[in-house]
Image: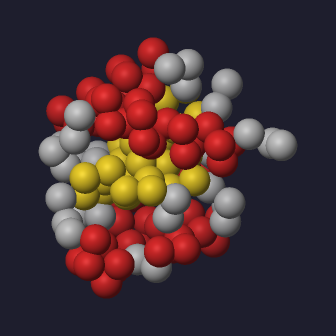
C-alpha cells in the first residue's frame, strides 16, 4: 500500500484529504507543523507528500529541501492559497509534481491530482 503524508497546519484540510485518500486505498499520515512532518517522513517514508508552504516550526520550503535530500524521488504536491508566481518564488518548478490550490474541491483532487500521483507511482 502506498503511503501519503499530509502536512498542513489546518486540521480541516488534513482531515478531509486524509479521509478521501484513505478511501482511495492509500495509507495516510498527517502532520500539523514542519518538525512533526519531518519526523514522520523519516520513519514512515511516504511515497507522496502533500505540503503546505506556510507551516509553524519549519517552513514548507525547509521541509521540501530536507525531503529532497532524504528521498529525492518523493512525489510532492504543494497545498497553498498562493498564486503560481508566489509559489515559484519559493520553490523550483522541478522540485514539485503538482499544486493543489486552496480552497479546493475533492473532485479536483480526484480528476487532476490523483492521476498525476498514480502515474508517478506506476513502476512502468
Q: Can residue 15 be seen in this view?
A: no
**Which residue lies at the image location 68% right of the left edge and 60% below the top edge?**
73
Give how far across and how far down residue 78 sits, in percent: 37, 57
Residue 47 position within the rendered picture, expressed as x and y whole percent measured from the top left? 62, 45
Is 109 rendered above or below residue 47? above
Query: Which quadrant would the C terminus be assigned to in this image?
Result: top right
- Given residues 41 and 123, the one toward you in this image is 123
Number of numbered tags placed on the structure image: 0
Q: Is residue 99 visible?
A: yes
Which residue is rendered at x = 50% and y = 20% of the image? 24
Residue at 74% from the left image edge and 39% from the top image edge:
122
Q: Is residue 68 left or right of residue 21?
A: right
Q: How is the image coloured?
A: secondary structure
Where does the image place residue 101, in percent across and percent down from the top left?
25, 52
Snapshot quadrant of residue 72? bottom right
User: Which residue lies most toward the front here?
Assistant: 111
The residue drawn where x is 35% and y is 66% is: 60
Compared across the picture, whether 104 is left or right of 1 comes to left
Amino acid at each position: 500500500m502506498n503511503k501519503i503524508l499530509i502536512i498542513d497546519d489546518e486540521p480541516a484540510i488534513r482531515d478531509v484529504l486524509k479521509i478521501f485518500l484513505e478511501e482511495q486505498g492509500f495509507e495516510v499520515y498527517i502532520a500539523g507543523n514542519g518538525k512533526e512532518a519531518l519526523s514522520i517522513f523519516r520513519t514512515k517514508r511516504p511515497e507522496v507528500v502533500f505540503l503546505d508552504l506556510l507551516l509553524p516550526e519549519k517552513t514548507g520550503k525547509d521541509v521540501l529541501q530536507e525531503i529532497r535530500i532524504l528521498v529525492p524521488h518523493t512525489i510532492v504536491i504543494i497545498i497553498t492559497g498562493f498564486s503560481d508566481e508566489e509559489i515559484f518564488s519559493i520553490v523550483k518548478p522541478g522540485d514539485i509534481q503538482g499544486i493543489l490550490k486552496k480552497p479546493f474541491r475533492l473532485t479536483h483532487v480526484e480528476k487532476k491530482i490523483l492521476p498525476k500521483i498514480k502515474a508517478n507511482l506506476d513502476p512502468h
